[in-house]
Amino acid sequence: MKQKLGNIFGIISIISGVLYAVFFSLSRKQFTETFLVYSLLFLCLYAFYKVSNKAFQVNYRFLSNKWSGRFFNSDVLLLILAVGVICRVSLITYTPNLSQDFFRFIWDGNQLLNGYNPYLYLPDEVMRSGGSSIPNAALLHANMGELSSGHYTNYPPLNQLFFAAAAFLGGKSVFATMLWMRVFIIIADVGLFFYGFKLLGKSPYLILLYFLNPFVIIELTGNLHFDGMVAFLLLLSVYYLLKSQQIKTALFLAYGVLLKLTPLIVLPLLFRKLKWKRASLTYLAVGAIVLIGFLPFYSSDLIEKYSGSVALWFGDFEFNASVFYVIRAIGYELTGYNVIETAGIILPMITFISVLFIALKRKNEIPEVLLSSMVFSFFIYLLLSTTVHPWYLTIPLLFSIFTRYRFMLVWSFVVFLSYYTYSNSQFTENLGLVGLEYTVVGAVFLWELLYVKKNNFRKNKT
């Protein structure tokens, strides 16, 4: 039986490798083909889960007695780590074709590397002035897209630092810079693996639901999004929170905010766990560290330009939304125009009130409750957002594996339907597919919330 499990795991790994090779050979315009391969990769994830679950139960050892257990208590974890790393490393030379954001990453990194404040200059303006400070400026500008080139950067300081580090290590080569970004992202995922399985306690193999998830491998390692690094820093913060190490809790939370602002959602949820005095000190520490992070970029125009850029994601941009699209349709019927400016003010307020309610009413001093509160809070944030790109799901997906809820896992599959938009030359969304996506996610969420028995709740060892 044990040898059979090892053989099955190996076969699934080989099939997954072939499927990833096929997936990344396709264009994003080939929606049907990419979605089919993506679906098959999720079947492989399910197979990995079933085999790992069985192997963990029988304490499967695939190494010799001399080496077995030397790295992990279970050899299954080593298998999961090895397959995940191999899948990621195999993409090291791949150029993303599902997202063009990395062109802006490289642009910002070179701006900073050459002594320019990336928050103060539009790529369009730099190109009109010659763009001489940016290696491969014309290539980067042409490929980042008009939406990016015509707006100020919204990536926080620590993210800019990684962009600059990759640009420094990559020199004037776009390919080498892209490669170094991928190295940073892979390292963060490996770190996340080691801390993640520790938090899972008695079921450490469940880390595969994140680490071997095709969504994670494709969107983060493949498409060069840094949300996995944000998730890793937030995981470190929670890990040290549960270890009652307040300084490290604040430090890693602040680092997460300096990579992407969304971890701010977690702050109210810490109140009941930390109590009034320690919570206040933590909030002050996070605020101070974030402020220090922005100080090197400070100028009289920074606040206006950066806040204006961030505001675009609430009152201007729209993609793959749920509640907002319903409001938009009603708004067109009642007013005859798009009500996004009004909705972009009200919906964030509802999100804030909802998170505050979760923070005050749920027993977040209990680790299991805190982790599920984080998932619910990010879920509400995404439901009420006007823009929901697939990689935005990374943080709630990660923290959902520490709970009994699997609706985020389902969403990480059906969110791929949003890529239909890029399969047509007009970049028009198929609202039927968007509706299907949210119907499936909503149905699974409600089923888990209302009908799954509480004794299925997965206990986390803290």
Image (cartoon, rainbow, N blue to C red):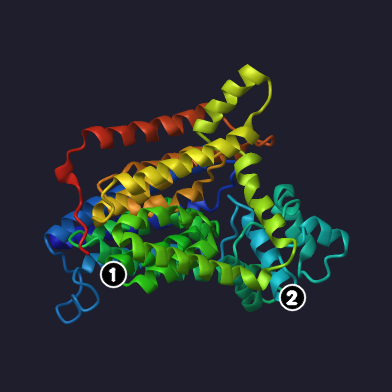
**Could you say where residue 453 lies in the image, as x and y percent from the top left?**
17, 39
Residue behind mark 1: 244
CA neighbours of label 1 inside 10 A, class few (<14), some (14 to 19), many (20+): few
Where residue 60 sits: x, y (%)? 15, 64
Q: CA distance from mark 2 to mark 1?
A: 40 Å
Q: Which residue is mark 2?
A: 115
**Residue 106: image location, x then y, percent:** 66, 65
On the image, the x and y values in percent for residue 96 come to 59, 56
User: Does residue 69 appear to the left or right of 339 in the view shown?
Assistant: left
Quadrant for the C terminus in the image: bottom left
Check the picture and name the quadrant holding the N terminus.
bottom left
User: As shown in the figure, which amino acid type bears the numbered disc 1?
Assistant: Ser
Q: Nearer the viewer, residue 215 or 326?
A: 326
Crowding near pointer 2: few (<14 within 10 Å), some, many (20+)? few
Viewer-proximal residue, 250 or 28? 250
Q: Judge by depth and name the residue closer to the eye, 206 or 25.
A: 206
Give the residue at x 62% y 33%. 342
Q: Is residue 201 visible?
A: yes
Q: Amino acid at mark 2?
A: Gly
Q: Residue at x 37, y 43 (%)?
A: 357
Residue drawn at point x = 41 percent, y = 58 percent: 17
2 or 1: mark nearer the eye: 1
Reply above or below: 30 against 150.
Answer: above
SS at mark 2 in the image: loop
Image: 424 above or below 180: above
Q: Is residue 458 left or right of residue 153?
A: left
Q: How many marks?
A: 2
Q: Secondary structure at mark 1?
A: loop
Q: What residue is shown at x 20% (from left), y 74% (from top)? A: 63
Q: Does residue 22 appear to the left or right of 202 in the view shown?
A: right
Residue 258 picture quarter: bottom right
Of label 2 and label 1, which has the lower sequence position?
2
